[in-house]
Amino acid sequence: MEAAFLDLFRHSPDARTVAAGSVLFQPGEPGDVLYVVLSGELEIRIGGQVVETIGPGGIVGEMALIDNAPRSAAVNAASDAVVVPVNERRFLFLVQQTPFFALNVMRVMASRLRRRTTPG
């Protein structure tokens, strides 16, 4: 992600620390926030398999926030991490006020979908 994207969240008062090994969320849980990773690494797991490791500037949980469906994957901290939760209200504000935020979220979703559906 661009540095400008990360700068949107760098001084967020609601940033929280996630200890290495902790579970951020599990499949089937309600998803009312996405998380922006400020530091550390998170692992996205589907069926117990790590499908992606997310570092600073990355996001997780965007699908459930956008479609109001339960979480489709598990996310845990591969190292100590700092994340910023983004609820729907903040998400809508960011989309309206910062168009590149919306573009970055769409790029993440498209990339993840392409990796899951493209053979080889």
Image (spheres, rainbow, N blue to C red):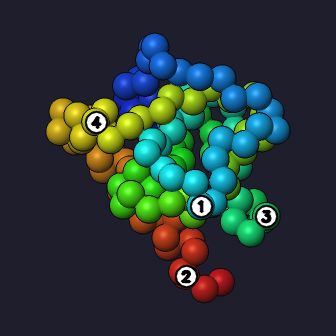
Asked if disc 1 and disc 4 are in contact, CB closer than 8 Å, the reply is no
Marks 1 and 2: which is nearer the front?
A: 1
Give the quadrant of residue 117.
Answer: bottom right
For image coordinates 53% across by 21% down, the residue present is: 15
- Residue behind mark 2: 118
Q: Residue at x 59, y 61 (%)?
A: 28
Q: Secondary structure at mark 2?
A: loop
Mark in the foreground, 4 or 2: 4
Q: Nearer the viewer, mark 1 or mark 4?
A: 1
Q: Earlier in the sequence, mark 4 or mark 2?
A: 4
**Would you say the residues marked 4 and 2 are in contact, meaning their CB atoms lie under 8 Å apart?**
no
Percent x, y for residue 62?
45, 51
Q: Residues within 10 Å of mark 3 (few under 14, many from 20)?
A: few
Choose mark 3 or mark 2, whichever is in front: 3
Label 1: few (<14), some or many (≥20) within 10 Å? few
Under tag 4, what secondary structure? helix
Residue bearing mark 3:
48
In whole angstroms, how far apart are the C-alphas of marks 3 and 2?
21 Å
The amino acid at mark 3 is: Gly
Give the mark toward the camera: 1 or 3: 1
Residue lying farthest to the right in this orientation:
21
Give the percent coordinates (x, y) of residue 58. Answer: 53, 42
Residue for point 51% across, 44% down: 59
Residue that carries the numbered disc 4 in the rendered image: 89
Say if mark 1 contacts mark 2, CB within 8 Å: no
Q: CA distance from mark 3 to mark 4?
A: 32 Å
Q: Please name the amino acid that badge 2 sits on.
A: Thr
Mark 1: which secondary structure?
loop
Closer to the N terminus: mark 1 or mark 3?
A: 1
- Earlier in the chain: of badge 3 and badge 2, it is 3
